[in-house]
């Protein structure tokens, strides 16, 4: 393990985090928030100095990173960013564990909040809270790769470790170009949503922070009642559209515009993604209609909440914790599915669900026809056996992490629904859960919060990247 390489790149990542803290500092100055100005000024200095020391005292010459070094940089990079990103919350008076929980929830785009009262905090603190999600949405390491030419080769393994999905889609031969394209698409949609939300009646501040959370599928809002605080069907419709966009593989937008116009609609994962959302919305609409809501209101609530949970955005336009148990079961299942690979959404991803179903069906057919040779395909692409093995490993480890954290939370005295939904929503980077974790996670014991923030960390990096750090042989030469 070349630790000089590891510390050097981690220093670079931390330095960029320090630079990003200048933005909420400007917001604090604009809104004349003296206490917040001091908070962000202190944090900027601490983080920037730490990043600079790590970067400039560890200057190795390298052309390529090993797989182990890349995994360490990605896993520890995300944890350090969450740790240092928690400093503003800590200085604002939030406890250390709660600050780390809120920061980890932000950078991993989970949106599970520890704050029982959100609107008591300054605008700049809440701006930073939402901005952490936007930075984490497309990926912190991918952003650094997009900016720094020297990581164009060395970042290949890091790109694979951070980006979501079983298969990594390189849009261009040069990795830097791919990273720039992905961030370019992300930024373009973000600017478009800000403009439309401003036109819809939001203030510029609200439009920006809600765009941060929407495009990152994070779900943080500066309002206690989330999107329900606006009570505006048009705003909800705009956010639904952009949550849907954020849950799609971003590379497909580029391919549709520059390569093949029908790339998106022909994509099997996209078709399944839309089908799951449509059928879930229909079922929940009928349940809510039967429950007593008008058909129009039932569809409005159902469509928003299904898209919000499926894309792991975690916004709320109504208190769905009060809905019938059948609807909550559907939402719980959607927490495991998530959006498309290559999107900002979390959870298992639609592509993995499709491939697992196809794998199961193939094994059933093999019982009938033992000599059958039938490759698993997505469109015209045959999926290699090593990819399927990786998907099965991910699925098993994902379920073990879910079951393990659920058992730990249950042992602390939490009811089963709270324990299950808290585990599912943090592991899938979804946001709100049911019962005690419906509004926020303040009722969870301290040890439980630590378990859940670890869930967010391993869920954002798709389990294996983090869990491999706890294997002793990983650290041996």
Image (cartoon, rainbow, N blue to C red):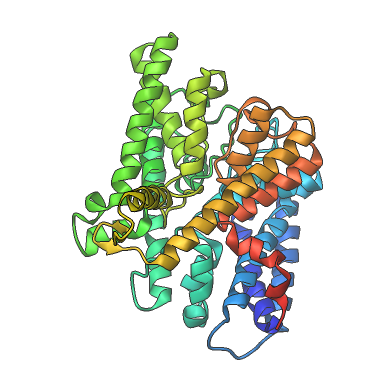
Q: Is residue 269 above or below residue 54?
A: above
Work out whether residue 150 or residue 261 is closer to the camera in this orientation and state it. Answer: 261
Image quadrant for the C terminus? bottom right
Q: Give the residue furthest to the top.
A: 292
Work out whether residue 81 or residue 277 is closer to the camera in this orientation and state it. Answer: 277
Seen at 73% across and 37% down, the residue is: 409
Residue 407 percent coordinates (x, y): 71, 39
Work out whether residue 8 or residue 164 is closer to the camera in this orientation and state it. Answer: 164
Residue 197 seen by the camera: yes
Residue 133 percent coordinates (x, y): 56, 50
Q: Is residue 321 above or below residue 371?
A: above
Seen at 59% across and 34% down, the residue is: 432
Taking the image as shown, residue 411 lies to the left or right of residue 52, namely right
Residue 342 percent coordinates (x, y): 42, 57
Image quadrant for the N terminus? bottom right
Residue 158 picture quarter: bottom right
Q: How many marks?
A: 0
Q: Is residue 206 above or below residue 175?
A: above
Q: Give the residue furthest to the left.
A: 261
Taking the image as shown, residue 254 lies to the left or right of residue 342, namely left
Residue 111 picture quarter: top right
Work out whether residue 329 or residue 16 is closer to the camera in this orientation and state it. Answer: 329
Q: Is residue 280 above or below residue 143?
A: above
Seen at 53% across and 20% down, the residue is: 325
Residue 17 seen by the camera: no
Residue 445 percent coordinates (x, y): 79, 36
């Amino acid at each position: 393990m070349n630790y000089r390489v590891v510390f050097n790149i981690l220093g670079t990542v931390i330095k960029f985090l320090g630079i990003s803290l200048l933005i909420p500092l400007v917001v604090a100055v604009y809104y004349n928030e003296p206490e917040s100005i001091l908070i962000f000024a202190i944090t900027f200095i601490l983080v920037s100095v730490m990043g600079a020391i790590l970067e400039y005292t560890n200057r190795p010459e390298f052309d390529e990173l090993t797989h182990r070094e890349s995994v360490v940089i990605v896993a520890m990079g995300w944890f350090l960013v969450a740790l240092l990103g928690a400093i503003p919350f800590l200085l604002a008076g939030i406890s250390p564990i709660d600050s780390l929980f809120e920061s980890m929830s932000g950078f991993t785009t989970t949106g599970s909040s520890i704050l029982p009262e959100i609107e008591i905090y300054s605008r700049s603190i809440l701006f930073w809270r939402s901005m952490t999600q936007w930075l984490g949405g497309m990926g912190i390491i991918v952003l650094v790769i997009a900016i720094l030419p020297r990581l164009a080769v060395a970042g290949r393994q890091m790109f694979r470790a951070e980006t979501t999905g079983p298969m990594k889609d390189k849009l261009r031969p040069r990795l830097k170009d791919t990273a720039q394209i992905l961030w370019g698409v992300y930024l373009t949609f973000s600017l478009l949503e800000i403009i439309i939300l401003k036109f819809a009646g939001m203030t510029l501040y609200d439009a920006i922070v809600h765009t941060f959370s929407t495009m990152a599928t994070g779900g943080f809002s500066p309002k206690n009642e989330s999107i329900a605080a606006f009570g505006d069907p048009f705003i909800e419709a705009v956010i639904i559209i952009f949550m849907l966009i954020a849950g799609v593989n971003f590379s497909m937008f580029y391919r549709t515009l520059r390569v093949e116009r029908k790339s998106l609609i022909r994509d099997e994962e996209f078709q399944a993604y839309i089908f799951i959302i449509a059928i879930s919305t229909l079922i929940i609409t009928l349940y809510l209609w039967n429950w007593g809501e008008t058909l129009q209101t039932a569809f409005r609530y159902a469509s928003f909440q299904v898209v919000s949970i499926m894309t792991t955005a975690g916004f709320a336009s109504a208190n769905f914790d009060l809905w019938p148990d059948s609807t909550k079961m559907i939402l719980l299942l959607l927490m495991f599915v998530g959006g498309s690979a290559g999107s900002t959404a979390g959870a298992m991803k639609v592509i993995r669900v499709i491939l697992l179903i196809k794998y199961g069906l193939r094994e059933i057919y093999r019982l009938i026809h033992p000599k059958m040779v039938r490759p698993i395909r997505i469109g015209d692409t045959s999926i290699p056996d090593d990819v399927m093995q990786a998907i099965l490993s991910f699925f098993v480890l994902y379920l073990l992490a879910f079951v393990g954290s659920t058992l730990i939370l249950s042992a602390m005295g939490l009811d089963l629904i709270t324990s299950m939904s808290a585990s599912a929503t943090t592991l899938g980077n979804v946001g709100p859960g049911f019962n005690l974790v419906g509004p926020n996670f303040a009722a969870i014991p301290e040890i439980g919060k630590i378990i859940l923030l670890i869930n967010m960390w391993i869920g954002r990096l798709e389990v294996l990247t983090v869990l491999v750090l706890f294997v002793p042989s990983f650290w041996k030469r």
